[in-house]
Amino acid sequence: MIFIAIDPGTGLKSACGIAILKSSSVGVELLQLKDLWTRTPQPNALMRIRDIVDQIEDIYTEWYDKENGNIAVAIESFVMRGKGGESLQRFIGAALTRVPSPKVPIIEVANTKMKKFVGGSGASDKEAILKKVLIKFPANQALIMAGVRKEYDAIDAVGIGLTAIDIYSKMEIYETNN
């Protein structure tokens, strides 16, 4: 299954990090990493959100196989107060409305859960997450280092994807056993 992992960002102070991971019986493969910014300057948060979510919809379309429904969407969920948190919540809602089918699994991943799963502690910093991602995907070091920006958004998306794959695999086991 292909996991499209999203680290939300509205393109003003940070990008929206995207990681595409493939999970199979032989393991997890990192296929793509990118930061999404607004394509052109936008006058307000809602227009920035629309621009970035349009790009996410293009990614869904690129990877979604209508016949096999082979994708899952993993997105960071959190609660943050203030205007920044409000914009991120709007972003998350908008990104999820563009998922191509109601049958596509959506896995919400709390930031602290990702930090604990990938970095070993709920307080892991971005450098610790980067180190663990480099260890997990040694063949993709050039791709990973190209994805490192000031805010590490794409690297966080990898962590969100890895955590979501773990959550999803446990959900499948639970459903199989019941």
Image (cartoon, rainbow, N blue to C red):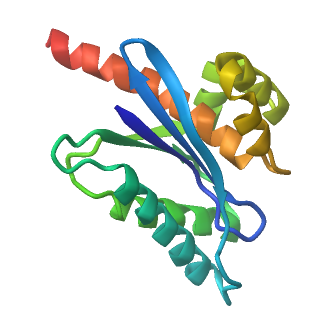
Q: Left of 35 or right of it: where is 55?
A: left
Q: Quadrant of residue 114?
A: top right
> Residue 11, can we see it?
yes
Residue drawn 68% across the image and 28% down it: 140
Q: Quadrant of residue 125?
A: top right
Q: Residue at x 66, y 86 (%)?
A: 42
Residue 124 visible: no
Residue 106: give x, y in percent of width and height: 35, 43
Q: Is residue 142 above or below residue 173?
A: below
On screen, residue 163 versus residue 144, left or right, reads left
How far across and how far down the image is residue 124, in percent? Answer: 77, 26
Name the residue located 20 percent from the left edge and 51 percent from the top edge.
66
Q: In this orientation, which residue lies closer to the viewer: 13 or 27? A: 27
Q: Nearer the viewer, residue 91 or 57?
A: 57
x, y percent for residue 175: 19, 19
Quick one: 77 or 126, which is closer to the camera? 126
Q: Answer with left or right where residue 66 lies relative to residue 35.
A: left
Residue 174 drawn above or below residue 60: above
Q: Which residue appears farthest toward the bottom when viewing the image?
A: 43
Q: Residue at x 51, y 67 (%)?
A: 55
- Pick the quarter of the image with the N terminus: top left
How many labels were placed on the picture?
0
- Compared to residue 25, the image places residue 162 above or below, namely below
Please identify the quadrant where the C terminus is shown.
Answer: top left
Reply above or below: 129 against 96.
Answer: above
